[in-house]
């Protein structure tokens, strides 16, 4: 299973970049041109790994942002019902008083 830790992924990028530089240096030492170096399968593989790891970091950041927003929304929701309950209680008490007045007026008319 792949790592979902941003620091681990950053370490992987550094590792792949080091391997890429070493491989390029070795190929240049052998006298290959830049075009031939870019066609090398190992070079292509290391570049692809770097790209995949950067994409993974991007998704990790998006997920962290989403989780933070959800946590904030949950906290806001927890605060809001407490104030809403007070409002509901005061609204419920008023209609009860009205009903009691109506019932008194009905009793008086009898």
Image (cartoon, rainbow, N blue to C red):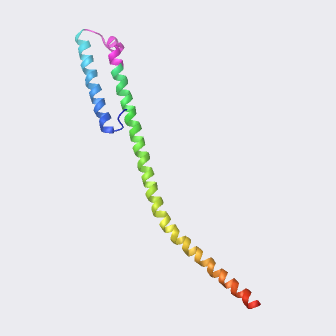
Total count of labels: 0
At a point 35% along the width and 35% down the height, the residue shown is: 3
Q: Which residues are magenta?
A: 31-44
State whether residue 77 is above or below residue 25. Answer: below
Please give the name of the residue rendered at 55% of the width and 75% of the height, measured from the top-left corner.
Answer: 90
Going 41% across and 37% down the picture, which residue do you hit?
A: 59
Q: Is residue 58 left or right of residue 32?
A: right
Q: Residue at x 30, y 10 (%)?
A: 33
Seen in the image, is 106 located left or right of residue 52? right
Query: Between residues 103 and 29, which one lies in front from this camera angle?
Result: 103
Quarter containing the C terminus: bottom right
Location of the N terminus by quadrant is top left
Q: Height in image: 8 above or below 96? A: above
Q: Can residue 33 be found in the magenta stretch?
A: yes
Residue 14, horizontal then vertical, whole percent: 27, 30
Q: Main secondary structure of the magenta part?
A: helix
Q: Position of residue 96 (x, y in %)?
A: 62, 79
Q: Is residue 85 above or below residue 57?
A: below
Which corner quadrant of the image does residue 87 belong to? bottom right
Residue 28 occupies quadrant: top left
Q: Is residue 20 on the magenta stretch?
A: no
Up-down: is 63 above or below 26?
below
């Amino acid at each position: 299973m792949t790592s979902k830790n941003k620091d681990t992924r950053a370490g992987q990028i550094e590792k792949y970049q080091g391997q890429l530089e070493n491989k390029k240096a070795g190929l240049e030492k052998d006298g290959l041109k830049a075009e031939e170096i870019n066609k090398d399968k190992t070079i292509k593989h290391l570049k692809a790994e770097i790209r995949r790891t950067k994409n993974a970091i991007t998704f990790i950041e998006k997920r962290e942002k989403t989780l933070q927003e959800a946590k904030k929304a949950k906290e806001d929701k927890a605060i809001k019902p407490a104030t809403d309950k007070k409002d509901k209680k005061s609204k419920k008490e008023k209609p009860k008083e009205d009903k009691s007045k109506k019932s008194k007026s009905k009793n008086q008319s009898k």
